[in-house]
Image: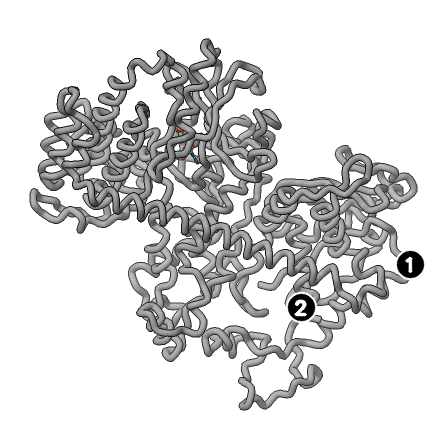
Amino acid sequence: MAPPGSAAIAIVRPPPDHGAAASSSSPAAAAASKGDNRLCRNLQLFGSCKYADRGCQFSHDLPGTATTTASSSSKPASPAPPGTSSTPLSAAALSAAVFVPGGGAPTSAAASDAGRAPPSGTLTPGGSAMAVQAAEFVPRRAATPALSEDAAFFAPAGQEGPEAGPSNGYNQAMADVGQQSADGLAEYYHQAMDLNAPEYGGAPSESSAALHPYSFSHALAPPGANGGAPSIPGMSHAAAAAAEAAYYNSGMGAMQMGHFVRQPLQYHLYHPLPSTNPRHLSSTLSSRTGSHSPTTSFFLPPALHISLTQKSEATQATPSVDMKLPDEVGGYTGLLPLDKPPSEGGSGGGGPAWAGYRGWAYKAWKEGEGRCYMLRRIEGFRLQHEAAIAAVEKWTRVRHPGLVGVREAFTTRAFGDQSVIFVYDFHPCSQTLYEAHLSPLATLPPNPWSTPLTHHAHHAGAPAHTAPYRSAARPTVPSAVGGGGGGAAGAGAGGAPLLPERVLWSYVVQVASALKCVHNSGLAMRTIDVNRVLVTGKNRVRLGGAGVLDCLTWDGGQSIPAHQQDDLLSFGKLIIALACGSTSAVHNLPKSVDHISRMYSPDLKNVVLYLLSKPGPRKTIEEVLVLMGPRVVDELNSSLVAEDTIEHELMRELENGRLVRLLTKFGFINERPEFDHDPRWAETGDRYLIKLFRDYVFHQVDETGRPVTDLSHVLTALNKLDAGIDEKLMLVSRDEQSCLIVSYREIKNCVENAFADLSRS
Ligand SMILES: Nc1ncnc2c1ncn2[C@@H]1O[C@H](COP(=O)(O)OP(=O)(O)OP(=O)(O)O)[C@@H](O)[C@H]1O
């Protein structure tokens, strides 16, 4: 669906003939009247357009065979999509001067009431005479769905809207993808791309049938039937957790969150649908086997693209309601809570899980660095010894792909109490092992609450890796395991899906390798627990919470050898919990070990038995690694480091690419010589807002009016614009007589509209 009309925001009252000019001579109007005879892009990319006979407004005549002429007048008139025609400014818009934040009010009513006093929250410095005639600022699409929902994958005029219809199947899939865990993405994408699905002209398959019942509104519905906080399509777990935490922390519930319309990113923009044309399809398939493909080779693999986009989005996430958190804590700003409420499978945060102290997790930006970090706040902790916090410095030197990197620690009173803050690397979209595998809402096996779709019998000696690494649909009622207290009888006996052995081994090897690094550095982890180990990507785990207990229970480092032995014991218990699908499995060790020996290979059982054996000087992590084969571990380490680096690079590329596109659009919109002579071009409507935003991004000045060059500000603002978030910012006119409070989302809409207007002209 093409974007509907864009927002017209006029701050300065234009000359009286403006309306006529806008409606008759604006470039958009000229564009609309000309029509469009450009070659259909579907044709260029896929060789065919399934909408060719169903209203697609673009040309389907290939050069050479074309019978139509380039003359726009000869092109049959096709209905212009909403928003493509010029939008005459209403009388209200012409006299508009005052922007009303959160403006969702109906335009006409507001316009007719132009003389009334501005509501509270309106900013009208120096407004006076202008404000008297002012109409409320109403973003043209304030009451419509967000931009990305509008901008569906090519849907020509006359086709169904985003709510229904086969053309929207991909959007539905993408919206639903947002609710999948990172591990399910690739598989999910293949379902979404199922070429046998009816919309591709094939027979309905099981997977496509499973996909179709989803609707966009389904994706927007709250999770579960028990009335959780709204779940948001396209939103990462971390971002959703933060939003939901806001929902609970604010105590305002749905009333507040009702305003939060999260717009999913346009995931579909940069990777094409596979062609239905057999010729192109075969070339697409051959590209997977290495031969040349004309189009697909230009794109990232979709699952990777989606995963990176989600991570980038989770990194940029901001709170949508006032969290009542300090603006700044030790040089970190933009705090966003990460603790998930129980309805999301988290602990809700704040449990006395840290040596009797309550702990909270936040995402925050480091001032001047433009990087995101995870802050762990230990509430109400009074530091007795300086050396306790200095001990954390040792941790900052330990770098390992299996460890959540420690940056620093400091005390603060910013929260109104005595808190100590530990700063870690931020891993967007991560979950704890408990959240990922064991909680009632876990998406991955062996969640003991889930009802399996199929029962995979695993007998001793049977290749456990044949088990599907995908959990069944989430049930609302606990199954046979009985609320998670089933211990060893849990996963296997209860019929719930088993954690595949290859995945378990992958975790075991990563944890062991990280532990080796930690122990060799003369430290002890002390947080080997399903609630502290993070799953940061597909089959990627990292040990979290390093250094916290060292500081809280500081003893000068005397007990490190004992703590290292405890690490090994905790490691054994972690494997048991995952293998048996229950944290309580460790309370019945004989039964649990028996379960493991029946369901998994003897090698795994041997490792577990070793880890659970009596502590002693000869029981070390090195010995555990010998049991596993050290060569494998070293190889794994280097491949994980490489993987992390590549992912990091790709994310940077993705973000840079998006910024470049944005900047190009800015340049395109703002630097149009053909309109330079018409001051109204950039002074009215969407363009004026964009112009002010450009000043805000690139032309900041300090209090004495001197230019400020802050790359971090530029990148942050552009990233927020790209994500189209609901955060508001204040734009000031060049004469400093007017202010606008608008959200990045509204500006993004304006940029898209202005760009679309220009590209049509
Ligand atoms: N370094 C990190 N980067 C990104 N997200 C993280 C990081 N560490 C933790 N998280 C996220 O924050 C959430 C809360 O983490 P936390 O370790 O506090 O778990 P918890 O179960 O709430 O523990 P507790 O409440 O007992 O402190 C988790 O969902 C996890 O995904």
Tag 1 near tag 2, CB within 8 Å: no
Q: Say few, some or many: other residues with alpha carbon within 10 Å of mark 2 (under 14 / 14 to 19 / 20 or more).
A: few
Instruction: Report which residue position mark 2 lands on.
Output: 759
Mark 2 residue type? Ser
Instruction: Report which residue position mark 1 lands on.
Output: 16
Q: Nearer the viewer, mark 1 or mark 2?
A: 2
The number of discs equals: 2
Element under disc 2:
helix
Q: Is residue 66 left or right of residue 602?
A: right
Query: Within 8 Å of ligand 1, the CB of disc 2?
Result: no
Viewer can see residue 255: no
Q: Is residue 687 left or right of residue 399?
A: right
Query: Within 8 Å of ligand 1, the CB of disc 1?
Result: no
Q: Is residue 403 left or right of residue 28?
A: left
x 66%, y 85%: residue: 70
Q: Say few, some or many: other residues with alpha carbon within 10 Å of mark 1 (under 14 / 14 to 19 / 20 or more).
A: few
Q: Residue furthest left?
A: 460
x 12%, y 35%: residue: 605
Residue 363: x and y in percent read 50, 33
Q: Nearer the viewer, residue 472 or 462?
A: 462
In three-dimensional space, the C-alpha distance between marks 1 and 2, rounded to whole angstroms, equals 28 Å
Viewer can see residue 84: yes
Residue 359: x and y in percent read 43, 22
Q: Measured along the vertical axis of the image, is residue 552 above or below residue 293? A: above
Mark 1 residue type? Pro
State which image quarter holds ligand 1: top left
x 79%, y 40%: residue: 706
Q: Measured along the vertical axis of the image, is residue 360 above or below residue 383? A: below
Element under disc 1:
loop
